[in-house]
Amino acid sequence: MSLLDEVERLDEFRWRIPRRVREGMRVPGVVFASRQLLEQAALDGALEQVVNVAYLPGIVGASLAMPDIHWGYGFPIGGVAAMDRADGVVSPGGVGYDISCGVRLVRSCLQQSEVKARIHELAQELARVIPKGLGAKGRLGLNRRELEDVLRHGAPRLIAGGIGWEEDLEYIEEQGAHRGADPGKVSERAFERGAGQVGTLGSGNHFLEVQAVQEVYDQEAARGFGLFEGQVVVMIHSGSRGLGHQVATDYIKIMDRVVQRKHISLPDRQLVCAPVESSEGSDYLAAMACAANFALCNREAMTHFARQAFSSVFGRSPQELGMSLLYDVSHNLAKPERHEVEGRERDVVVHRKGATRAFAPGRPEVPAAYRHLGQPVLIPGDMGRYSFVLTGLESGMVRSFGSTCHGAGRRMSRHQAKRTVHGEELKRRLQEQGIVVMAGRMQELSEEAPEAYKDVEEIVEVCEGAGLSKRVARLKPMAVLKG
DNA sequence: ATGTAC
């Protein structure tokens, strides 16, 4: 019998995989999805991965999956799992290779019509100052000592050196600095790969877009977030580049040995983990925090260059252009948090892999200016359609440890997209729709074609229906920078 | 996602 046949429908957008389907599950699985999205998740093996995660020591509540779930390394992408801090494990596969990949949104006071007239020039200038693509080198040229400082102290250190604004910090998750970051736990190889990559976009689904606010769903929240229809904003989606990738690689190897030594039984070797309280577990969290700080600095540095690009094109200072940071949030992290589980407060490590923190109104982690509205959630879509700004909800705190989706999710493999979509033709097609594309390689562009992705609005609607997050605004691309 | 294997 297929796993899909054993899934129980809780309501229109929530499905449970009961513990009894596989011996050894410590908690049930819960998937937030429409029936159609659930069936897609079953096809690529991601549902099996939800089940596998439920075996992990110390997992509490349920092994969760968001509507954009798909197959990933060990854990599904779109998975959320909370492990007890005292007797649970931390797993690098539950974070993913791109540690602290995330999204930020920068406002402007410019109108769509003003920017449209200069969009080619703006896109060219952005592409000139922001390196993109695999192996791209940045313009900052941090030395070993400076990189170490950045890993330990995060965005405040970069800002102290004149890159970024002091006021940005309030609007970055963890105020721009992840606690417990220890560069001593990061390998020399990771240092080597990360050196020179601060301020670079990367490749794949990473992008920088100039967007316009196309539709507002919640006027009060949009006003509170400083958004209005027709406004031009900048969205940056990027991660920790080679440094985070190396940290993940290093600790997967280290934990593979831990699992063997401690005889931890796992349904999939890719779920390698170590007790949160063990030296390997805490070392990983300390190195992960460094990679997360790197990712925050990377996005902060690109924001700095984007502000300069706007300034040189529009002949006004970034301050005059109102280029303040709305928010920066990651969708690949494991974080120590306190949550109510089955009526009891528990200290847990919440693994979010392709899932975004979406805290409810009133939570102290939400910036004071937004606290009555809930945490801003930034959901990137595909380059031809739209992206979303959402806000966290109280119901999501209990149902998903304050988490929601992270994006559209593929409907075509890279290979399939490459075969069916012609890069140059796609670029022309987008250009006709008023979207300027600056792409490093045409092959990459076809892999990222809009038709290769699901409609992100469908994903976001499920999250709203499941009570995890609520729509605030929809953003339409005007110019796209792609690796 | 990623100096797409050491």
Image: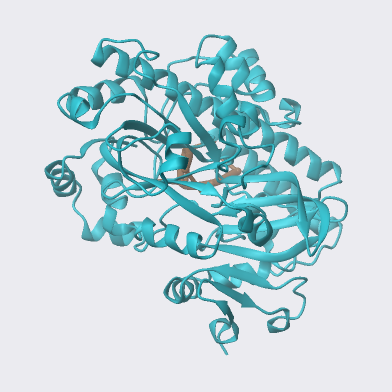
Q: Residue at x 68, y 62 (%)?
A: A269
As rendered, which of A355 and A195 lies closer to the eye? A355
The x, y position of residue A148, in whole percent, is: 66, 20
Q: Nearer the viewer, residue A74 or A209?
A: A209
Chain coloured brown: B
Image position of A313 with respect to A448: above or below? above
In percent of width and height, residue A460 lies at 44, 57
If the image is split into quadrants, where does the N terminus of chain A sit? bottom right
In the rendered structure, the colour chosen for chain A is: cyan
Residue A405 visible within the image: no
The residue that appears at 26% across and 20% down in the rendered structure is A125
Q: Position of residue A213 (x, y in %)?
A: 32, 39
Q: Quadrant of residue A305?
A: top left
Measuring 38% from the left and 20% from the top, which residue is drawn there? A322
Using the rendered view, name the quadrant where residue A188 is placed: top right
Instruction: Say left or right for A322 vs A385.
Output: right
